[in-house]
Amino acid sequence: MTIIRSVFHDELEGISQSLVTLSELVSGSMAQATTAILSADLSLAEEVITKDQKVDQIHHDIDARIIDIIARQQPVASDLRALVSALQMASDIERMGDLAQHVAKIARMRHPQMAVPPELIATITAMGSAAVAITQKMAVVVATRNLEMALELDRDDDEMDDLHRQLIAALLDKPWTHGLETAIDLTLLGRYYERYADHAVLVSHRVYFMVKGEYA
C-alpha cells in the first residue's frame, strides 16, 4: 500500500509540473502576442498562433493522464479533489493560451498596419505586463500551493480591471478619430487581457480549494 501511495503522489507531482510547464508556455505566448500587437510583428504573431497547438497538446496529455490515474487508482477524498482540480486548472490555462492567440490574430489581421493607436500603446503595454506577471505568480502558486500567494491574485486582477476600464473610457472619449474597426479591435483586446487574468485567478482559487477543501 505504501508503494502504491508513493507512485500515486509521484504521478500527481508530475501532473503539477506539467501544469507549471503549461503556465510558463502561455505566459510566453502572451508576452509575445503583446509585442506582436504593439509592433505589427507578423512573424511573432504567427509564432504565437502556431504555438497554441503545443498548448493544446499538453492540455490533452494532462487530461489523459489524470483520467488514467483515476481509473487505475480509484482515489477518494483529498486525492480525488486534487485530480479534479488539476483537470479544471488545465482547462483554465489552455483557455489562457487561446486568449493569447486571439491577441496575436488581431496583430496578424491588421498587419502591416498597427492595431493600437499611439495614445493607447502605454495602456496595452501595461495590460500585457500585468497579464504576464499574474501568470508567473499563478505558476508559483500551482508549483508550491502557496495559499497566501493564491489570494494575492485577486488583488493583482484588480490592476487588470482598472486598466481595462481605462481602455474602455478612452474608446468612449470623444472625439474618437481612429474609426470603428480600430475601436472593435481594442474592445476585443481589452476583453482578451481581462479574461486572461480572470482565468489565472480561477486557477489560484482551484489550488486553494484543492488544499483546503473549500473556496476562498
Image (spheres, rainbow, N blue to C red):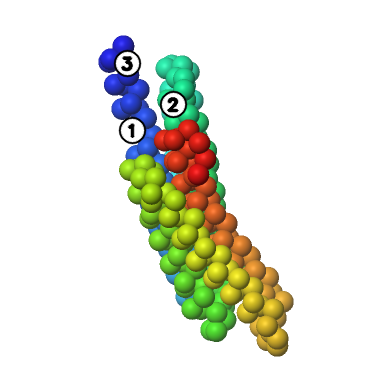
Q: Can residue 41 be seen at all in this image of the molecule?
A: no
As measured in the structure, the alpha-carbon distance from the residue carrying label 1 to the one carrying label 2 is 14 Å
In the image, 186 versus 172, the foreground residue is 172
Mark 3 closeness class: few <14, some 14–19, many ≥20 residues within 10 Å: few
Amino acid residing under circle 2:
Ser
Q: Which residue is mark 1?
A: 13
Query: In the figure, is residue 56 to the left or right of 137?
Result: right
Question: Which quarter of the rendered picture does the N terminus lie within?
Answer: top left
Mark 1 closeness class: few <14, some 14–19, many ≥20 residues within 10 Å: few
Query: In the figure, is residue 165 to the left or right of 216?
Result: right
Residue found 47% across the figure and 72% down from its top: 126
Residue found 46% across the figure and 20% down from its top: 76
Eye-nearest disc, 3 or 2 = 2
Which mark is on residue 175?
A: none
Which of the marked residues, 3 or 1, is nearer the chain's N terminus? 3
Q: Residue 134 in the image: x percent, y percent?
A: 43, 58
SS for tag 2? helix
Which mark is on residue 78?
A: 2
SS for tag 1? helix
Q: Which residue is mark 3?
A: 4
Q: Residue 36 in the image: x percent, y percent?
A: 47, 69
Amino acid residing under circle 3:
Ile
Which of the marked residues, 1 or 2, is nearer the chain's N terminus? 1
SS for tag 3? helix
Query: In the figure, is residue 106 to the left or right of 139?
Result: right
In the image, 183 versus 122, the foreground residue is 122
Residue found 60% across the figure and 74% down from its top: 167
Residue 100, relative to residue 66: is it above or below?
below
In the image, 117 versus 209, the foreground residue is 209
As measured in the structure, the alpha-carbon distance from the residue carrying label 3 to the one carrying label 1 is 14 Å
Is disc 1 in contact with disc 2, using a CB cutoff of under 8 Å?
A: no
Eye-nearest disc, 1 or 2 = 2
